[in-house]
Image (tube, rainbow, N blue to C red):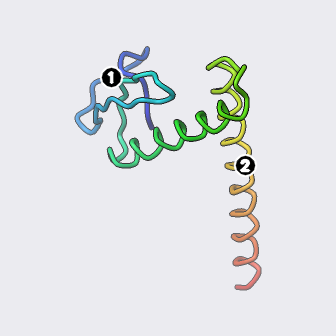
Amino acid sequence: MISKIGDIGDVMNEKKHKITVEIFGETYCLKSDIELGQVIAVAAEVDSRMKKIAQKNLRLSPARVAVLAALNIAEEYLELEQNYKQLIQMVEEEK
């Protein structure tokens, strides 16, 4: 899980890593219990998605760009989750 440093309920945990990333021109100090390379990859993906949306819609505010990026990512996630469940069901039926 990735969280912003200083979030409510933030408990110092030796397994958590701190990292600073830049997304859409803003710097974020994050803490995560996943590998730093994965955090960097996630941040880079979000940054890339936001930049692509902003290039196509020059009048959108950064907040709207972020929401559209989140909606696109969530849509893809839900589609992948559905495909995964279908694959699991197919494997179970083969047994």
Q: Residue furthest left?
A: 14
Q: Residues within 10 Å of mark 1 (few under 14, many from 20)?
A: few
Q: Considering only vertical position in the picture, is 25 above or below 87?
A: above
Q: Are marks 1 and 2 in contact (CB under 8 Å)?
A: no
**The residue tagged with tag 1: helix, strand or loop?**
loop
Say which of 3 and 50 sits in front. Answer: 50
Going by the numbered disc 1, the residue's amino acid type is Val
- Give the x, y percent position of residue 69: 66, 35
Quadrant of the image containing the C terminus:
bottom right
**The residue tagged with tag 2: helix, strand or loop?**
helix
* Side (left or right) of 79 relative to 17: right
Q: Residue at x 40, y 42 (%)?
A: 39
Residue where numbered disc 2 is placed:
78
Quarter location, residue 33: top left
Q: Residue at x 66, y 26 (%)?
A: 65
- Give the x, y percent position of residue 92: 71, 77
Q: Give the number of callouts.
A: 2
Q: Residue furthest bottom?
A: 95
Say which of 16 and 61 sits in front. Answer: 61
* Side (left or right) of 37 relative to 59: left
Quarter location, residue 64: top right
Q: Residues within 10 Å of mark 2 (few under 14, many from 20)?
A: few
Q: Considering only vertical position in the picture, is 40 above or below 13?
A: below
Residue where numbered disc 1 is placed:
11
- Give the x, y percent position of residue 8: 43, 14
Say which of 8 and 40 sits in front. Answer: 40
- Give the x, y percent position of residue 30: 37, 28
Q: Residue at x 67, y 49 (%)?
A: 77
